[in-house]
Amino acid sequence: MFKKDCFLENVFYLAKKKNLKINDIESAIGVSAGYLSKLRYDESRKNINADIMFGIAEYLKTSVDYLNNTDCNKLNDDEIIVSSFFEKILLDTIEGVCQWEREPEAMLNDNRGHIANALTGSDRKWEIEYHSKFDLPYQVDYAGDSYVLEIKMNAYLAMVRLKDTETQKIVIETYLLFENGDKTEVDKLCIYKENEPSELDSVIINLYEAAENSGNRLSLDYSTSKFLIDYLGESDEYHYKNLPF
């Protein structure tokens, strides 16, 4: 459902935060000066042209879904930074720029993978268990696939899908992992908890789903893509200019 008030309030809020002029946004999307201000206060108009919505989202480097479903006025400065970061990763994932690595539950339970190396340890019985950094009042365990994205060399964004072992409610924890030899530094970002609403819920869920779906897209390694492009008779210049890395 389209929420005009939420959408437009977010546009004006983010424009102010990013030191952007509303007139410049209006010019970029091809509408007359004052259009968005009039639309903001005109209660008789409930909808906005889809091309205009997508144009605004592109100009603000975010998504229509984010503008429509997140109340930016309720976010503090750190939450704005995290949500903007997640939105950038989300758009890059949708465009095929980001290649997520799936770490299935079986792998994590065998104490393998980036997430397991960073967030598991032994209990008093020397059994491997997951150690959340969010100080949850209940025990959690893996609940399906988790995903890791290398952002820079040895720096990863991790999305860990968990469940409350008693209620089975889903939890998604997000972290930055910085690997340095045998050690991994873990910085917590934000968390989604089923039936415990927060302002960042839709951002976290959308990014997790995008990571989940990214595995269904075709991804060629360097040698394969170069072979195909060479066969097509394209130059190296075309290759480096158009591939997303």
Image: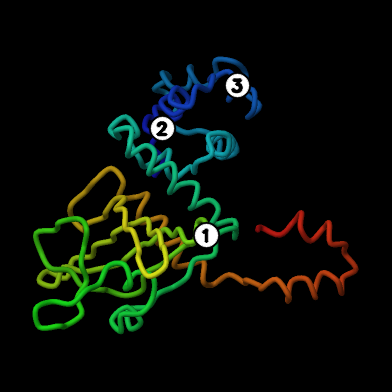
Name the mark nearer the viewer: 1 or 3. Answer: 1
Residue 99 to residue 16: above or below:
below
Q: Label 1 neighbourhood size at 10 Å, few (<14), some (14-19), many (20+)?
A: few
- Left or right: 101 in relation to 27: left
Q: Position of residue 93 (x, y in %)?
A: 53, 57
- Left or right: 59 in relation to 189: right
Sequence-wise, the earlier of marks 3 and 2 is 2
Q: Label 3 neighbourhood size at 10 Å, few (<14), some (14-19), many (20+)?
A: few
Q: What is the three-letter code of the residue carrying label 3?
A: Asp
Sequence-wise, the earlier of marks 1 and 3 is 3
Q: What is the three-letter code of the residue carrying label 2?
A: Lys
Sequence-wise, the earlier of marks 1 and 2 is 2
Q: Which residue bears the numbered disc 2?
A: 4
Q: Which residue bears the numbered disc 3?
A: 24
Q: Nearer the viewer, residue 15 or 243?
A: 243
Name the mark nearer the viewer: 3 or 2. Answer: 3
- Real-space CA distance between mark 1 and mark 3, rounded to the nearest whole angstrom: 36 Å
Tell me, yes or no, whether the two marked residues, 3 and 2, touch with CB atoms within 8 Å.
Answer: no
Residue 194 to residue 232: above or below:
above
Q: Which residue bears the numbered disc 1?
A: 153
Name the mark nearer the viewer: 1 or 2. Answer: 1
Label 1: which secondary element: loop
* The quarter of the displayed image where residue 171 is located: bottom left
Residue lying at the far front of the rendered structure: 181
Tell me, yes or no, whether the two marked residues, 1 and 2, touch with CB atoms within 8 Å.
Answer: no
Q: Label 2 neighbourhood size at 10 Å, few (<14), some (14-19), many (20+)?
A: some
Label 2: which secondary element: helix
Residue drawn at (30%, 80%) of the image: 111
Q: Quadrant of the C terminus?
A: bottom right
